[in-house]
Image (cartoon, helix red, strand yellow):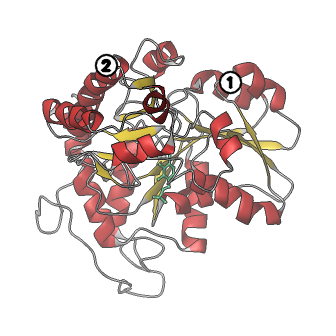
Amino acid sequence: MSTITQLIHSIPVDPQTGAIAVPIYQTSTFVQEAPGVNKGYDYARSNNPTREIAEKIIAGLEGGAGASAFSSGLAAIDAVVKLLQSGDEILAVDDIYGGAFRLFDKVYKKFGIHVNYIDTSDIETVFHAITPATKLIWLETPTNPTLKISDIAAIASIAKANNILLCVDNTFASPVLQQPIALGADLVVHSATKYLGGHSDLIAGVVISKTPELAQEIKFYQNACGAVLSPFDSFLLIRGIETLPLRIRQHNQNAQQIAAYLEQHPAVDKVYYPGLASHPGHELAKRQSKGFGGIISFTLKDDATAAATAFVTATKYFKLAESLGGIKSLLCHPAAMTHKSIPDEKRRAAGVSDSLIRLSVGLEDAEDLLADLEQAFAQQPVPAKVTAAV
Ligand SMILES: *Cc1c(COP(=O)(O)O)cnc(C)c1O
């Protein structure tokens, strides 16, 4: 059976009514025949049939023993951190998602959890950063917005040898392109707000665990802390996942064409896309994933905030917004948006230059997207330096 057929038929027909779509069980509680005697559900924070189906489908997609769905990607990340104790240390990829950084730095630091941010794309750096306190390695690959690639299998073997959990935030790749558990990871998290949902109409998160024991522990924190995904949002998530493989295929094809176009454009300085041979992580990305995804970043030769602002306000189909992974193309200017809270020097040192623009390539026709970018380049102001020389 192909993976698409398998995915579509992992979505069950309702046994009671034959409904082909998953019913939304919009209920808070479940009637019991006698105290403790029920049909597997007692209270909807602990378990809800709609959410349970979403969790099973996603566990299957990622090849995990179980999954828990949360009300946001950050709530999913939060549940993983709760596996740790005060005094434990996390080794995290240095250009981690900003919200994860804020959670670690502003919330968990005061509870005694220390985070060491390192360049995980360099395996030696990972090896040497491990201390007796290290209990969790946190990867994103590709990262945001410079799409750095880390070697999941190599880091998994270092983690295993040192009795450390490895968690991969697989939001950018999606399980269609990359399955961290098959590469040795213990835990996978998703902001299901992005590709899994895919339609920019919900906020959701998931943790997938390799073993039943870890799955049970995460389930405990899901119920104990309570940030569960609602029945309606679980339904939307299932509905989005039904087309995930088709959407990812189109995101990839469009992005590959656009990256090639940007790479030869005279106004563009650097293009960050793992599908380009020029990307330092290209060979590794080819080895550990089935495709390169729909996110591209690029910088302008005129590396000025003004040039980037002019560009991101000149596109028609690429809408200016944070977030990614939806059917409509989006673009953002990280220096002024997602990465604004990072001091300028630190941000530039991380490769996020003043003119860096991030595209989330959607499902429109590639020709239309290319034409949109072309007309935005044509509207670019003449760089200040050139004007002065004339
Ligand atoms: C968006 C995002 C998150 C956070 O998810 P929310 O659903 O917004 O809470 C975490 N990791 C990555 C890589 C993201 O892009």
Residue 358 percent across, percent down from the top left: 42, 40
Residue 230: quadrant of the picture: bottom left
Residue 137 percent across, percent down from the top left: 69, 39
Question: Residue 266 versus residue 336: which sits nearer the camera?
Answer: 266
Which residue is denoted by mark 1 in the rendering?
157
Label ID, residue 44: none
Label 2 element class: helix
Which residue is denoted by mark 2 in the rendering?
260
For the residues labelled 1 and 2, the Cα–Cα distance comes to 35 Å
* Amino acid type at image mark 1: Ser
Quadrant where the image shows the C terminus: top left
Query: Is the CB–ligand 1 distance for label 1 below 8 Å?
Result: no
* Amino acid type at image mark 2: Ala
> From what the image shows, is residue 224 above or below residue 310?
below
Question: In the picture provided, is 158 more to the left or to the right than 192?
Answer: right
Question: In the picture provided, is 54 more to the left or to the right than 222?
Answer: left
Quadrant where the image shows the N terminus: top left
